[in-house]
Structure formats: C-alpha cells, structure tokens
C-alpha cells in the first residue's frame, strides 16, 4: 500500500485525544520538575537521573505507540475511501506500465466498454484503440516516456465490436515506472460535436452555394456578416467589409442617380416586398445592377439585433430585359410596317389578342366589329381542331391556303400556325396577305393564254389547212363515187341489193371518217373554258395523232406509239393536252426534213414515276444546240424562219397549269426528246373520257 501523505489536508487526519495530550504534557512537566529539584540525596543523584531518563523513554515510547496506532487507522480509512472511489467511479481508472500495457483497471470498464478488467489486464492500450487513432496513442506514449503527462481522445473497441470515444489523461511516475490513467466517456459529446460540425458544414455549404449575396448589420448599421456570394458580388474581401459602417465602399458614387436610394433602405431596413433595384460599384469600378431585400434580424429571444440584406445580381437579367424590350420594339415596328395583316387569336375562344396596323385597317374596310378582318377557314378546313389542341401539340401548322372575303370580295393568302402565347395559352398566329391584285393578274393572264392558245390552234389549223383539205377530199370523193355507182346501178335496173348494200356501207364509213375529222378540228379550234376531267393518256394520244398524224404523214414521218396498258388516268383538259402533243409531233416531224424518209420516225412513250405520268415524244432529227436550250421555252424565241416563237411557251404554260413540268433532253441516237409530266388523279370521282 502507498504510505499516507503527511501533508494531506487536515480534514483527512483524525484529531488527537485530549486525555493523551494532557498525560503526555504532565509527564514532561513532571520530569522537568524532578530534574530541577535541588539535590538532597547526595549519592542518589545518578539514580535519579537514570530514573528520569527511563521515565522519559517510557513516555516517548508510549507516545510513539499511540501515534503509530492513530496513523494506521488513518491509512486504513484512506485506503478504504480510495478503494470505494476506485470501485464506484463512472470514469475508468487504471495503471499502465512503461510499455503501455494495463496492470490494473476499475470496474467502470464494464459499464463503459462492456469489457471485464481481468480480461484486459496485460493487454496494451493500443490494442483496443481504433486503427485510425493508434498514431495518436503512440504520440501520447512517447510523451509519457519523456516524463510528460499526456491527454488524448481516441475511439476504443467495446465488447460487442462497436467503438466509443474516450478522453484519456495519463500521468507518469518515472521512479515507479508506472503510469496512472483516467478515461472519461465523451461519445455523446463527440456525437453532438459531429452533428454540430455537420450542421455547420451544411449551413456553410448552403451559404457558399447560393448565388444571392447575404449581409447582416447590427442596429448601428455596422456589417457583422457577409457570405461568399456577397463578397464576389461587390468585389471586396470579407475582411474589408466586416466592421464597416455606412457609407459602404460598394455604394455608387454620390453623383450617380441611383446612389441616394441606398441611404434610406440601408439605414431604415425597409424595402418593398418585391425589393428595390439598385446599382453597385464593384471594387474594380464596374457598375452592376442588383435587387435588394431587407428584413429584420431577430435572435432566439425574439429581440431584433440588426438587419439581414439579400442582394441578387440582375445585371444579365436587366440587360436581357432591355434587349427583349428593344427586340419587341423592333418586332413591333416590323409587324406594324408590314402590308400583310397579322393577328393572334385564342385557339379555344377565337378572342383577338394582337393585331397589327394592316389588320386593323382591313377590319375598318370590312366594316365588321367581330373577328372577321380577314376571311377565316371553316373548322373543317383544319387538319386538327385548334380548339382541342394541347401543350404538347404545338407548335404546328394549321392552315395554308387562299380565301376570299365574303363582304369585300378580296382574296387573301392565309397562313395560320398554332403556338404557345406569352401567358402559356394556345393561340393561332395568322398572316394574311392580300392577293386580290395577283388573282386579277392571274385571271387576266389565264384569259390571255387561253386566247393565245386558241390563236395558236387556229394558226396550226391554218398551216395544216391544205393537208386537212386533202385528207377530207379522200372520204368525200369516196362517198361521191360510191353514191354515183349506186345511182347508176339503180338507173340501169341491173343490180343486186347486196352490191348496193356494200357500197352504201363503205360510203357511210367514209362519211363517219370525214365527220370525225371535222368534229376533232372543230373541238380543237373552238373557244372554250378549260375543263379538267379524268382522261386516259392513250385516248389523248390517239386523238392527237388523228389530226397531227396527217401533217406528219405529209412530212414523211411515221409515228410509233408504245405505252403500257395499265396507265392510270390523269386529271386534265383533253383539248389542251392534245394541243401540246400536236405541237410536239409537228415540231418533231419538221426537225427531220433533212433525214432520209425511212429514218423519219417519231416515238411516243409513257411511263409512271411515283405519282406522276410521264409522256416522252422523241424525234431523230438534227437535235437542239445546247446554247439555246435555256431559251427554248421563252416567248417569241424560235429557230424557224417563219415561226412566231409561241408554240413551246404555250405548251409549257399548259403543262404548268396542270401542275406538271415540260423539258427537253438530247436523244442519245440523235435528235431530241421532249418530256412532260401530269399528276395522277386516281382518287377523284369523275367520268372517264372514252
């Protein structure tokens, strides 16, 4: 056991007995008196001295016995108190040797780590410490080896394998080569610190991640807090701002028109709910626009301690707003300057949301107060009903066509598109262009082309008059001969009815032939409105050859037709297409006048290309100079000495009227191939010309 400390506090020592003290003092005084008495016995003085010495020794021995007993009692009491404190303490008390191995531990080890002291004695402290914290223990042991106390907090393994945080205080006793340690469980404190640290880090991360500049001032207006975004916004470091009082360095110059607006909000802490828009001057001198909000700063006791300011950089937003405003002004100026009527109407209700000046002028012209400034399509004219469009259905085209105003008679080309309006609703954006003048010009052009085509047909008939007269003379002469023969037989009385019947049938056939020629010529040259219907290509070619073949035969050319039997019908004006074929056949026959008779051949073929029927008219003449191909279809351009240069131009106009195309390619074997296309119209219901 460790000896009791003589310097222990008084309350730790038991007080001496008063009787013992009195007896001890009486003995000392008696001895002193006996020694001081005059010598009366003579020779007995040595014996008296020896008696005094013996009595003194006995008194001292008696005092020593009593003192030793009292000390033993105090030591026992101290050991009992120490053992009780050692056993009942909630902290871990222990003793380590110089190498850091446990020699003794109190029972608190069970309650703290769930380990029994007898199971851990002899183990090293570092063996129960978390691997990540062992370097800390090694550093503490090094300090202890140098005779210095050590304090460290490490994670120690519990009996169930978990870890708890313990704060160790170690004091070395170099003379005894022992270390006394005390360990206190700080797990709850560590958890609280980690939670607080995590929350602080989370709040700091939030403050650093927000783009809004935050600043706090006390009731005197002195800056007590700024976040990173605020520093970046104004261009000053945190140290340059904390503790500053108004005027602040980021305020704009006093001469700036916006600067006076800073003073009242900064000092009163009052701003509208939507904030105020201001300009700041950064540390680098650049001006930026900000929106500032100010709110009271209240502590946990509900007492206002200052003001919190939030500033958001709206420079880009301000610039974008200005750009949008300028763009809107430009777009409005453009729309107002257009001759086309532009309007925006609600797709569901047809409520007019926007209209330009041209649209309003058209409404005044129409004299209509409703949404009828320009003609509107019927609901059935739309591919989808605009009133039932949803957000994912737009943008999309709604209508593209020509409409006539029911009141003014004007023609408009109207295009409508469905899109989302600025407020999110679905609208119809319409652009209506007045095409009345173009319509009248087209009608006039059509009438002129019709008259020109008729004139061209008359000229063609005039050029073919002699040939037609010769062609008609043959059936008429045959009719006359057959008729006169029948008359002579009848007059002679010598005839058989079957002979007369055969002659009359032949005369009738010739009459039909002549009538067909006359009928075709009459249909070909008469003035009539274009009349499109479903016709067969083979029938058009046959009728065209019926007339043009006469001229081709006169020029020594023979025509070969090769077309598929399953060609679909086309929607066309039969007479117009016949005119095109007759013109191309006549041109082809004339182009081969220098060729030998047996080489003068015109091939007519037809083929299908997707939804088009293509007709090819090939000749084997001298061909066309590539330098003049681009001008071949121009008005009044001709390669003939007596030509007017209108035939091919009229032919192209006719084909384009039928939504087709006419062009020329060189014939690989010599000559030219004129090609034109006509669209198929197999889905239309109409009578097919036989």
Image (tube, rainbow, N blue to C red):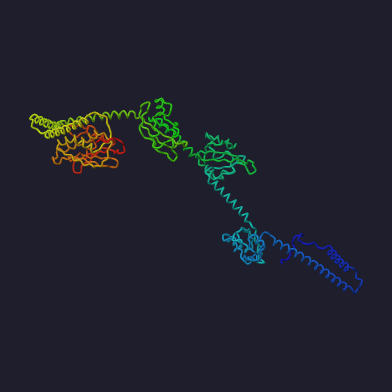
From this viewpoint, is residue 323 visible? no
Give whichever of 221, 155 is nearer the camera.
155
Where is residue 303? Give x, y as percent: 64, 41
Say which quadrant the C terminus sits in.
Answer: top left
Residue 408 seen from this side: yes
Viewer-proximal residue, 240 or 107? 107
Residue farthest to the right, as pictured: 40
Q: Which residue is drawn at 69% across and 60% down?
A: 89
Q: Which residue lies furthest to the bottom in this view?
A: 43
Say whether residue 67 is left or right of residue 649. Answer: right
Q: Look at the picture and state if 652 lies above or below 96.
A: above
The number of numbered discs placed on residues in the rendered structure image is 0
Q: Residue at x 59, y 59 (%)?
A: 162
Image height check: is 129 above or below 534?
A: below
Asked if residue 446 lies left or right of residue 641, the reply is right
| Quadrant of the rendered image containing residue 44 | bottom right
Where 371 sits versus 310, above or below? above
In-image side of 587 versus 86 (left or right) = left
Q: In which quarter of the image is residue 328?
A: top left
Q: Quadrant of the N terminus?
A: bottom right
Residue 596 position, x and y percent, is 13, 40
Give the quarter of the image for residue 339: top left
Q: Where is residue 587 drawn, in percent x and y? A: 19, 36
In the figure, is residue 162 to the left or right of 30?
A: left
| Front residue of this view, candidates 378 and 338 | 378
Q: Where is residue 96 in the image (x, y as percent from the top left)?
A: 64, 65
């Amino acid at each position: 056991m460790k000896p009791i400390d003589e310097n222990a506090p008084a309350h730790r020592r038991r007080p001496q007995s008063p009787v013992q003290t009195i007896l001890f003092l009486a003995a000392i005084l008696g001895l002193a008196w006996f020694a001081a008495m005059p010598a009366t016995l003579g020779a007995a003085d040595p014996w008296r001295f020896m008696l005094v010495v013996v009595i003194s020794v006995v008194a001292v021995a008696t005092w020593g016995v009593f003192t030793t007993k009292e000390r033993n009692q105090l030591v026992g009491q101290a050991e009992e108190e120490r053992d009780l404190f050692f056993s009942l303490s909630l902290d871990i008390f222990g003793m380590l040797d110089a190498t850091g191995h446990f020699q003794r531990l109190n029972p608190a080890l069970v309650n703290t780590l769930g380990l029994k002291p007898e199971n851990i004695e002899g183990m090293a402290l570092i063996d129960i410490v978390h691997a990540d914290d062992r370097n800390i223990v090694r550093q503490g042991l090094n300090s202890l080896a140098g005779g210095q106390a050590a304090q460290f907090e490490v994670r120690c393994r519990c009996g169930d394998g978990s870890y708890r945080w313990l704060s160790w205080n170690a004091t070395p006793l170099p003379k005894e080569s022992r270390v006394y340690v005390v360990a206190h469980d700080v797990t709850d404190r560590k958890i609280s610190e980690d939670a607080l640290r995590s929350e602080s880090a989370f709040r700091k991360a939030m403050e650093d991640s927000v783009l809004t500049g935050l600043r706090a001032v006390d009731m005197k207006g002195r800056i007590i807090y700024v976040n990173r975004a605020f520093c970046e916004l104004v261009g000053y470091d945190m140290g340059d701002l904390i503790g500053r009082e108004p005027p602040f360095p980021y305020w704009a110059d006093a001469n700036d028109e916006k600067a006076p607006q800073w003073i009242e909000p900064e000092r009163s802490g009052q701003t509208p709910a939507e904030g105020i828009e201001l300009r700041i001057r950064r540390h680098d001198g650049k001006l930026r626009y900000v929106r500032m909000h100010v709110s009271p700063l209240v502590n946990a006791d509900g007492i206002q301690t200052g003001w919190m300011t939030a500033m958001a950089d709206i420079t880009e937003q301000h610039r974008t707003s200005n750009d949008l405003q300028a763009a809107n002004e430009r777009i409005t100026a453009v729309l107002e300057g257009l001759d086309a009527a532009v309007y925006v109407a609600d797709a569901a209700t047809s409520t007019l949301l926007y209209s330009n000046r041209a649209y309003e002028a058209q409404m005044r012209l129409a004299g209509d107060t409703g949404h009828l400034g320009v003609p509107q399509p019927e609901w059935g004219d739309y591919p989808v009903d605009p009133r039932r469009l949803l957000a994912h259905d737009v943008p999309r085209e709604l209508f593209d066509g020509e409409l006539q105003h029911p009141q003014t008679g004007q023609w408009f080309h109207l295009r409508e598109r469905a899109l989302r309006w600025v407020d999110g609703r679905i609208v119809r954006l319409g652009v209506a262009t007045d095409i009345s003048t173009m319509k009248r010009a087209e009608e006039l052009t059509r009438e002129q082309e019709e008259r020109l085509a008729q004139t061209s047909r008359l000229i063609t008939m005039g050029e073919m008059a002699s040939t037609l007269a010769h062609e008609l003379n043959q059936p008429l002469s045959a009719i006359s001969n057959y008729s006169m023969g029948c008359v002579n037989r009848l007059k002679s009385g010598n005839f058989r009815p079957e002979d007369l019947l055969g002659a009359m049938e032949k005369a009738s056939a010739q009459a039909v032939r002549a009538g067909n020629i006359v009928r075709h010529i009459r249909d070909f040259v008469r003035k009539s409105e274009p009349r499109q219907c479903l016709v067969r290509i083979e029938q058009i070619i046959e009728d065209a050859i019926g007339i043009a073949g006469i001229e081709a035969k006169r020029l020594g050319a023979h025509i070969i037709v090769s077309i598929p039997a399953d060609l679909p019908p086309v929607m066309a004006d039969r007479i117009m297409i016949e005119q095109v074929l007759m013109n191309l056949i006549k041109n082809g026959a004339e182009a081969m006048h220098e060729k030998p008779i047996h080489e003068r051949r015109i091939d007519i073929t037809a083929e299908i290309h997707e939804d088009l029927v293509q007709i090819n008219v090939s000749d084997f003449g001298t061909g066309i100079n590539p330098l003049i191909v681009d001008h071949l279809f121009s008005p009044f351009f001709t390669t003939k000495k007596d030509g007017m240069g209108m035939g091919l131009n009229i032919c192209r106009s006719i084909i384009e009227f039928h939504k087709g195309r006419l062009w020329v390619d060189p014939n690989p074997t010599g000559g030219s191939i004129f090609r034109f296309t006509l669209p198929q119209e197999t889905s239309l219901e109409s009578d097919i010309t036989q």
